[in-house]
Image (tube, rainbow, N blue to C red):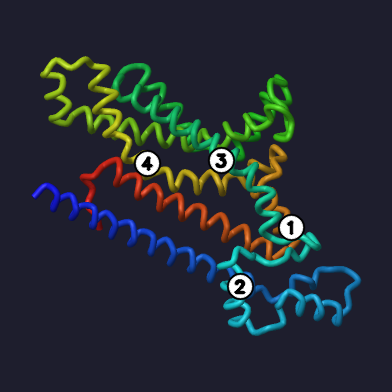
């Protein structure tokens, strides 16, 4: 009976993963389609802004990049190329492929994003747990005031303030990310909003868990308060934080577009802004789709991890 029950749970979990993965693939396809057709709805040619180019030269360039074919044919060819990891050639960075330029900036963005996410989760969980354990006391009120202020401030405002105070005035940190220690301020800038949000999520979840019967039972059995908190309360309060991990990475990746320009980080955010300024359609589509795929996969992994952490959730 036990083995049969376990097999049933495993099969349900597999179906859950397959359904979530199928939804992720469908979302990725929709993102690709919307991005492609929106970019192709722009009436001007990506080469029309070029100076001193004749109509014959523009026509030759459009033929080289496949822009002379009907839009549905271009879309099918684009899907085939993406399936092989080919996002095409940049129309402005001559001789460079889109995927090579993306990979060149992704290392900086990934390192910045992972640092910001780690700082946000660790600090947010600690502060949220402390606020819950000190509910109604001075520490709890201070944490709530600070997190409310941080949630209400855009990351570019925080980034500018940190740059002015710590880099330009106090000179405690470099102004550019490429200098030694230069990734600290950008990471802090991107981490403060999600840290504040995680703090509030963890506080609410921890208060809910601390009021559960099994916590009272554990304390009635004489378990030490530290063991009750770390073994039972903290573990069971992590569900909302894990669920927020996907949207948090989306915020960090999209927010990095502004922060990377403020601190001169040579990552995807700065590359995307430069592509917009130079009207490089292939780069704009490539970066948009690449970031969307990363965000969708993060959400998928967060869903699976949430189920692993809490088997009680409904597999639907």
Q: Residue at x 29, y 24 (%)?
A: 230
Mark 4, residues whose alpha carbon is within 10 Å: few (<14), some, or many (≥20)? many
Mark 3, residues whose alpha carbon is within 10 Å: few (<14), some, or many (≥20)? many
**What residue is disc 3 on?**
113
Task: Tell me which numbered mark, 4 or 3, is placed earlier along the sequence.
Answer: 3
Q: Secondary structure at mark 3?
A: helix
Whether residue 254 sits left or right of residue 14 in the image: it is right
Q: Nearer the viewer, mark 4 or mark 1?
A: 4
Task: Tell me which numbered mark, 2 or 3, is placed earlier along the sequence.
Answer: 2
Q: Which mark is residue 277?
A: 1
Q: CA distance from mark 4 to mark 1?
A: 36 Å
Residue 47 locus on image (x, y percent): 79, 71
Q: Are marks 4 and 2 in contact (CB under 8 Å)?
A: no
Q: Nearer the viewer, mark 2 or mark 3?
A: 2
Whether residue 30 sits left or right of residue 304 in the image: it is right
Task: Tell me which numbered mark, 2 or 1, is placed earlier along the sequence.
Answer: 2
Whether residue 230 sits left or right of residue 143 in the image: it is left
Q: CA distance from mark 2 to mark 3?
A: 29 Å
Q: CA distance from mark 4 to mark 2?
A: 34 Å
Q: CA distance from mark 2 to mark 1?
A: 23 Å
Reply above or below: 91 against 143.
Answer: below
Task: Tell me which numbered mark, 4 or 1, is placed earlier along the sequence.
Answer: 4
Q: Are marks 2 and 3 in contact (CB under 8 Å)?
A: no
Q: Secondary structure at mark 4?
A: helix
């Amino acid at each position: 009976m036990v083995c049969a029950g376990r097999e049933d749970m495993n099969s349900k979990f597999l179906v859950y993963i397959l359904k979530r993965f199928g939804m992720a693939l469908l979302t990725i396809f929709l993102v690709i389609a919307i991005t492609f057709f929106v970019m192709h709805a722009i009436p001007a040619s990506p080469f029309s802004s070029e100076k001193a180019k004749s109509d014959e030269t523009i026509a030759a360039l459009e033929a080289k990049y496949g822009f002379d074919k009907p839009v549905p044919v271009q879309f099918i060819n684009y899907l085939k190329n993406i399936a092989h990891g080919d996002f095409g050639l940049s129309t402005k960075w001559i001789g460079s492929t889109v995927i090579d330029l993306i990979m060149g900036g992704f290392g900086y963005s990934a390192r910045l994003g992972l640092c910001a996410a780690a700082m946000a989760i660790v600090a947010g969980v600690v502060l949220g747990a402390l606020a819950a354990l000190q509910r109604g006391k001075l520490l709890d009120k201070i944490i709530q005031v600070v997190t409310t202020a941080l949630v209400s401030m855009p990351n570019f405002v925080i980034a500018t303030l940190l740059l002015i105070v710590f880099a330009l005035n106090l000179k405690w940190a470099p102004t550019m990310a490429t200098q030694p220690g230069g990734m600290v301020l950008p990471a802090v800038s991107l981490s403060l909003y999600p840290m504040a949000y995680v703090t509030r999520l963890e506080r609410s979840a921890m208060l809910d868990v601390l009021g559960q019967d099994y916590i009272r039972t554990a304390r009635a059995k004489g378990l030490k308060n530290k063991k009750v908190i770390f073994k039972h309360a903290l573990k069971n309060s992590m569900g909302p934080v894990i669920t927020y991990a996907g949207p948090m990475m989306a915020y960090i990746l999209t927010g990095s577009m502004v922060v990377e320009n403020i601190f001169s980080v040579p990552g995807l955010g700065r590359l995307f802004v430069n592509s917009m300024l130079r009207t490089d359609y292939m780069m704009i589509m490539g970066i948009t789709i690449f970031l969307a795929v990363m965000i969708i996969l993060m959400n998928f992994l967060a869903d699976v991890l949430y189920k692993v952490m809490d088997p009680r959730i409904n597999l639907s």
